[in-house]
Image (spheres, rainbow, N blue to C red):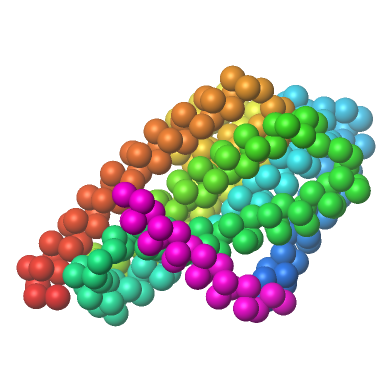
């Protein structure tokens, strides 16, 4: 077990080192984060001012902005792994990995996190500086941030297994980008990326709450807007349940694809 853990840890470290070989490229990726958060701050500042309200759905301006900092940090820090998996399937490279001494999914996860763990603190730092300067201090105590980081990592892991499943669909479909596009837009809307579920109509809010996509953006970000210990444990438990369920589906897709390769002779 320790040998396997060490193996994939080395993959993660090597991936991070390769990415850091181009530091300017790493820094440039945070430019979009700065633009998005700045636009959101201006948008919501004007919205609160024009409406004459100090809060909406339990969110005042600082809570809304820190919520958006977290959602954008998580999503922008997730590498697009599905494209790599899609290419491996189509090129036949995945078939060659079947006899290699590592698990393909875990290898891809280590590579994914090697990039993601670099992007996560950088994107958050950029967003946090803007939020702190233009919207005020975060509405949660400093000691609560480790819990927020933990559920953010679970959110990134859940995003990975979903992208893994999407990429593996290349065994049956010529282009998997359409599936990713649909998934991405659902996260944008029902996942609460741009707008907290608290502002949704009751029926739509209930539907969204029963989907895995809220575990990627809404639930972790809600902790940053209004931290609560009970909510933290509920969020982590929900994320783990969805992670196990979606990973099981991805495993079935992988086995079906491998069987397809075996039947067709590679």
The quarter of the displayed image where residue 45 is located: top right
Residue found 7% across the figure and 68% down from its top? 263
Residue found 35% across the figure and 44% down from its top? 246
Is 177 magenta? The answer is no
Relative to 266, is 31 above or below? above
For this rendering, which residue is in front, 104 or 265? 104
Lateral position of residue 151 relative to residue 121, left or right: left
Residue 14: x percent and y percent?
A: 50, 70
- Can you see residue 248? yes
The quarter of the displayed image where residue 218 is located: top right
Residue found 63% across the figure and 73% down from its top? 20
Residue 150: x percent and y percent?
A: 58, 40
Residue 147: x percent and y percent?
A: 62, 34
Residue 260: x percent and y percent?
A: 14, 65
For this rendering, which residue is in front, 39 or 119? 119
Magenta stretch, residue numbers: 1-24
Predominant secondary structure, magenta span: helix
Relative to 142, is 153 above or below? below
Residue lying furthest top: 230
- Can you see residue 192? no
Is 17 magenta? The answer is yes
Lateral position of residue 86 relative to residue 95, left or right: right
Q: Where the C terminus falls, by quadrant? A: bottom left
Residue found 75% across the figure and 66% down from its top? 31
Label total for image: 0
Residue lying furthest front: 2
For this rendering, which residue is in front, 65 or 42? 65
The quarter of the displayed image where residue 115 is located: bottom right
């Amino acid at each position: 077990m320790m040998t396997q853990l060490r193996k994939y840890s080395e993959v993660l470290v090597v991936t991070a080192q390769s990415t850091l070989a181009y530091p300017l490229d790493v820094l440039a990726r945070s430019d979009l984060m700065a633009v998005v958060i700045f636009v959101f701050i201006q948008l919501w500042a004007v919205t609160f001012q024009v409406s004459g309200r100090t809060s909406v759905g339990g969110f005042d301006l600082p809570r809304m902005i820190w919520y958006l900092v977290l959602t954008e940090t998580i999503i922008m820090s997730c590498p697009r792994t599905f494209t790599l998996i899609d290419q491996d399937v189509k090129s036949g490279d995945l078939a060659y990995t079947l006899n290699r001494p590592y698990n393909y999914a875990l290898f891809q996860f280590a590579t994914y996190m090697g990039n993601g763990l670099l992007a996560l603190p950088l994107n958050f730092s950029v967003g946090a500086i803007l939020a702190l300067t233009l919207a005020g201090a975060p509405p949660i105590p400093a000691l609560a941030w480790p819990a927020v980081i933990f559920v953010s990592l679970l959110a990134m892991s859940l995003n990975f297994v979903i992208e893994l499943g999407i990429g593996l669909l290349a065994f049956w479909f010529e282009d998997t980008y359409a599936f990713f596009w649909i998934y991405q837009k659902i996260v944008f809307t029902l996942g609460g990326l741009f707008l907290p579920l608290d502002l949704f109509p009751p029926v739509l809010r209930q539907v969204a709450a029963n989907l895995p996509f809220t575990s990627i953006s809404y639930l972790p970000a809600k902790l940053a807007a209004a931290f609560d210990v009970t909510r933290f444990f509920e969020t982590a438990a929900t994320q783990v349940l969805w992670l196990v369920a979606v990973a099981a589906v991805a495993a079935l897709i992988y086995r079906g694809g491998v069987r397809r390769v075996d039947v067709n002779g590679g």
